Amino acid sequence: MSSRTPLSTPRRLEPLRQQVLRMGGLAERILEKALQSLWERSPRLAREVAKDDLPIDRLDVEIDQAVLEFLALRAPVAQDLRQVIAIKTAATDLERVGDIARNIAQSSIRLCEFERKPVPRSLDALAGGSRRVLARALRAFADYDSELARQVIATDDEIDEDEGRVFRASVAAIKQDPGCCEQAVEFILVGRNLERVGDHATNIAEDVILVVDSLNLKHAGKLES
């Protein structure tokens, strides 16, 4: 059974929340295009990624300004304040997903300079996992579903493990064929960027739990250790 908790979003905040969800849709699409440019070794698609990132940056600035205005004029407290914080931090995480997509696109462009080598299967698995966890985090944010948010957080270790497999596969490829070193390094960089997508999805899930359950899970593991 879902622990989804119905929440009333202040009327003046709902448009901002919808802007975050719009950012989320754009971030998902730009990440998909960056990965497509990698799989297809398409410089054209890779160049489009940089252009597609601009609307995400603009939305981030608009949300930032609107949040500052809301804080100054409304002085929200309790749940309203938590929703404002969640909106701002989720927007920041999504803006960084856009930056990550640009990084992946740059790797794609550099890879076009070399004789094509197969993409490690572990990288394909990591890409799929990162995209899924981002989609689930956005769904949790859209529905304020704390149970789904907790599931997102629980999958973070799996993303980390997949990134480790990409690293090990790339190092093994270098040992077997030193001539593929530069390509293998690019695959390692892409893997690291995809792992960061998982981190940002986790941050968004933690924002949902902050709003719904009034629990701040930021750095919780570090503080407990």
Image (cartoon, rainbow, N blue to C red):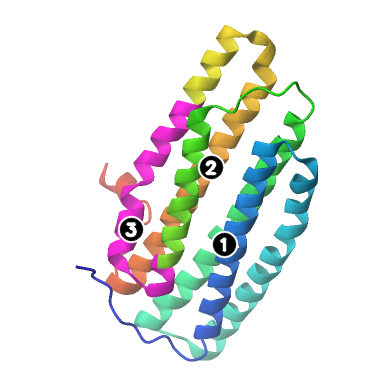
Image spot of residue 99 (x, y percent): 65, 51
Secondary structure under tag 3 reads loop
Q: Which residues are magenta?
A: 140-166
Residue 171 highlighted magenta (yes or no):
no
- Label whose residue precedes the other's in the sequence (2 or 1): 1
Kindly indicate the quadrant of the structure image that contains residue 159: top left
Which amino acid lies under the numbered mark 2 shown in the image of this protein? Answer: Leu
Quadrant showing the C terminus: top left
Q: Earlier in the sequence, mark 3 or mark 2?
A: 2
Q: Are marks 3 and 2 in contact (CB under 8 Å)?
A: no
Q: Which residue is located at x 52 percent, y 14 percent? A: 172
Compare residues 220 and 41 and report the one nearer the observer.
41
Q: Main secondary structure of the magenta part?
A: helix
- Give me the residue at 34% from left, 83% from top: 7
Is 163 located above or below residue 105 in the figure? Answer: above
In front of the other: label 3 or label 2? 2
State the image coordinates of residue 183 (x, y, percent, origin top left): 67, 23
Which residue bears the numbered disc 1? Answer: 92
Mark 1 closeness class: few <14, some 14–19, many ≥20 residues within 10 Å: many
Report helix, strand or loop for mark 2.
helix
Residue designated by label 3: 217
Relative placement, left or right, of 16 versus 146 is right
User: Given contact means CB atoms under 8 Å apart, are the residues at marks 1 and 3 in contact?
Assistant: no
Can you give x and y, in whole percent of width and height, for residue 155 in the image? 34, 47
Asked whether, in this view, residue 86 is left or right of residue 52, the answer is left
Q: Which numbered disc covers residue 194? A: 2
Marks 2 and 1, how far apart at CA: 17 Å
Q: Quadrant of residue 202?
A: bottom left
